[in-house]
Structure formats: C-alpha cells, structure tokens
Image (cartoon, rainbow, N blue to C red):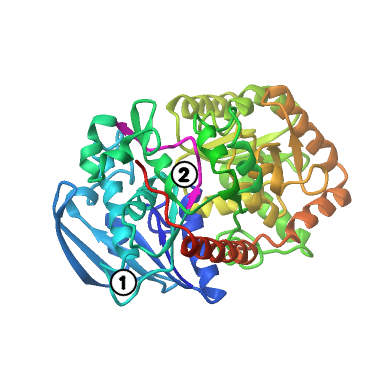
Amino acid sequence: MRVLHVAAEVYPLVKTGGLADVVAALPPALAAQGADVRLLLPGLPAVLEAVQSPRVVLDIGAVFGAMRVRLLKGRMPGTQLPVYLVDAPYLYRRGGSPYQADDGSEWPDNLQRFALLGWVAAHLAAGEADPDWVPDLVHAHDWHAAMTCAYMAEHRPTTAASVFTIHNLAFQGLFAHDDWALLGLRSGFMSPAGLEFHGQLSFMKAGLKFADAVTTVSPGYAREIATAEFGCGLEGVIQGRRGDVWGILNGIDPQVWNPATDAAIASRYDVSQRAGKAACRQALQAEMGLAPDGAALLVTVVSRLTSQKGLDLVLAALPALVAEGVQFAVQGTGDPAFEAAFRMAQEAHPGRVVVHIGYDEARAHRLIAGADAIAVPSRFEPCGLTQMYGLRYGTLPIVRRVGGLADTVADGATGFVFDEATPTAFAAAVRRAVVLRADAARWWTVAAAGMAQDLSWAGPARDYLALYERAVAARQRAPRLVAG
C-alpha cells in the first residue's frame, strides 16, 4: 500500500496544535506495519531548513499567483521517511504561523496557498508529478489539505483513493465565494453540492464531499459532528455521508512521551517508581515558583488559551480551589483576554498559581510529569492529546465528557470526568481528585491503571490500514463523486 499524507504542519518542524503530532507519528507507525508512506508539505521556512537532502523532482512554473513553484523531494529528519515539499517562495516563505501573520490576522492569500497544496497532491495521485512513485491512497489532513479531494474528484482517470481526516471541524477554511475562479475548478464545484457554504467557499466541505472516506480523530467526535450542537453547520453533509465517516482514536508517540526515558524531566520513572514521580513534582514546584506544599493537589493546564478549551471554567473555579489548597501551573498561548486573566490570577495568588504564556515543549514535559493532575475541561474536543500524555505520566486527567476525552478517560478508574460545562462541575471534579489524593495507595492505583494502557499508534495504524484497503477497493468498484 503506497500512501501519501498531505498536511500543513508536522512536529517538530512546524506545530500549532495536535495536528502536527499526528502527522509526525502516524506515517512512521504505518511504515512499521509495511506501508510505503510519503508526506507532502508546504515549503515553509522551517520545513525547508530541516528536510534532509532535498532535490528537485519537478519544475512546476507559475501557478496560484506564484511565479516560481517547484516540487522537491527529501527525507524527514529522524524518521527518514520520504517527503515532498511544495517550494513556492512567494506563497510560503514568510514569518508568522502557517496560517496567520505575526499580528494574528489570517494571511489574505490562504486560499491560493492551500489550494496549491491540494492541487500538487492531486497531480502526485494522478502520476504526473513523480512517475516513479504513484500512491494507491492519499490521506489529507484538515481543511488545509482538503482541496486534494476536490482536485482528485475532478480528474476522473485518477485511480488513487482518498481519505480525509477532520482534526477540528470548527476551523473550516472559509473564503469569499467570488474567489472561486482562483481555484481552477469547473463551476459545478461551486454549487451547494460542492464547496459552496452559506455564500462562501468551504475547504473543509471539499474534504467532506469528495473524499472516498472521512475520518475523525476519535469515535466520540465522529458521533458528535453529526449533531447540530457539534456539527458547525456541516452536520447535514456529515449525516449524508454517515456510512463513510469513521472515528479512529489518535495515539501518542511512546518514544517521545515516556517517563522512563524522558530526558526533559527531573527524574525518570515508571509505574513501579513512585519516588521518581514525587521528585518531578518537587522539581516542578521549585522551577515554577510554587510553594513547596506536599499536601496540595497540583493541577497543570497545557493548552491553547481559548474558550473552546473550557479555560473560563478554570478561571472561574480557581479562586475557591486555591483557597482550599489547590495549586495551578499553566502553560499556553491564545486569546489575549485569557492570557491577561491568567496573569492576573498569578498576581492574585503568588506561590499557588503560576502561568507561562507561550509554548515550550520541554517545559510541557516537566509540567505533565510533575503535576498530580492535568485539566482538560473542553467544551468540545475532537480527540485531545494532553490527557493521554497525562495518562502516560501517571498524571490523572480531569476532563469533560466530550469527544476523545470521553473515549480515553474512565471516571474513577483512570481519571475524573464531569458533564456540564460549568465552573461548579469542574470544581466538583477537582475536589474529587483532592479527596482521592489523600489516600496515596488508591491514588497510585488509579495512576498506574492509566500508565498501563497502550496509547501508542500501533492500534490506530492497523485501523487506518484496514480503512485504506476498504477505500481502495470501493474506489475500484465505483466512480468518484463529481460535483455538478
């Protein structure tokens, strides 16, 4: 099975969220099970600098507003997997994030930037870009790569199947309808049966409508997005493809996230070494400036600071919980209002609340290893990775019963789960953690149960390979859906 993964980011080269972790870990897991896997990425500066031995495969020329576009091929650092890069300096060589300028505004040419990525992927799928390697299946990740599926659908002779994964339905890649001509597709694709979405163009809808199979990153989220509460206006499209929508739970990289080998933490440990976990806790309190309180429940938050993540619940419940002896250590960046609110909480509760605005991967490891519990109180959560990192490190997750959080944390057995998106419900879950921690033996029994789970990518990789085989077989039996 020759598989091409198409994405806008990959850890550790470019990361804005969990998507980068998935794109870094799933392809090697597939390769370990016998698949011939390659990646396709935009030629962002950090990617071009890191990819090893890039060479020109094809000089594409002037497309999508760029005068010079080339397709390069090299090797990913670390995994050594083959990777294609779309080298378009005019579109990709700039600062900021892959999607936004430094001031937080969306790049005005994102339509062209990510349409180009999908267009190149479709030409690779058709055997035009690299005749020496043609994929059996193309796996496109999130809206940034979703146009792959539309371009493949337009080109009927393409025999490769396509799978589209929704990592977060809330981010859809919406653009002005009048810009449809920039995509180079027939007008039928701009109808409600295609990309049109309430008077705009939706890249997310391109993946939902034209992929041979659609996946989400947890079974729970696959069910939720077919409802009005979580469907973000696309629930009708998802319901229409119900038989083709699958939920496959993400894994985590057990080499990167392993307390027994983690060089970033103060003391390595495993399920039989409670003293190592305690040493990490003491070191974290010292590093972050928290009071050296052995009796306190130390809760960490490692997250984007947004309403989606339920951090307003944390802020509202925090004063009362701190008064009861709980400590909080927070790392993240996001909404300026949340950043300011957490800074104010730190000022109001010195030694009990500490906040680091920004993201530091090594510090994230220390926060998760050193805390007693990790809070993930999201309003919705497609999968969530930090709660799985917590399970791996014996740091009990406190999560809301949504999406992948509900799929990965068992209330009372591996963590604490609450239902209502209210400060009261969150605080009640934290207080249950306080009570359990008072019984050290019981606490470690719950922590050990989480640490013992297989959270690796081996199982999800098997599930994806099985889905790929179904998609390829179905593609051979039936023509691809075409708009208009």
Q: Which x, y percent locates residue 238?
A: 54, 39
| Residue 158 versus residue 99 in the image, above or below | below
Is disc 1 in contact with disc 2, using a CB cutoff of under 8 Å? no
What's the amino acid at mark 2?
Answer: Leu
What's the amino acid at mark 1?
Answer: Gly
Region of the chain picked out in magenta, as a range: 164-176
At horizontal 47% and vertical 65% (from top left) the residue drawn is 476
- Residue 248 circle label: none
Q: Which x, y percent locates residue 176?
A: 28, 30
Q: Tell which of 447 and 222 is nearer to you.
A: 222
Q: On the image, numbered disc 2 is attached to which residue?
A: 208
Q: Quadrant of residue 434?
A: top right
The answer, for residue 119, to whether it is visible in the render is: yes
At horizontal 50% and vertical 55% (from top left) the residue drawn is 21
Q: On the image, numbered disc 1 is attached to which residue?
A: 74
**How far apart are labels 1 and 2 at the CA level?**
30 Å
Callout 2 secondary element: helix
Q: Tell which of 263 and 33 is nearer to you.
A: 33
Q: Which x, y percent locates residue 404?
A: 64, 45
**Where does the C terminus fall, quadrant-wise?**
top left
Count the labels in the image. 2
Q: Of callouts 1 and 2, which one flags the residue occurring earlier in the amino acid sequence?
A: 1
Q: Quadrant of residue 269?
A: bottom right
At horizontal 78% and vertical 40% (from top left) the residue drawn is 295
Q: Quadrant of residue 7?
A: bottom left
Is 172 magenta? The answer is: yes
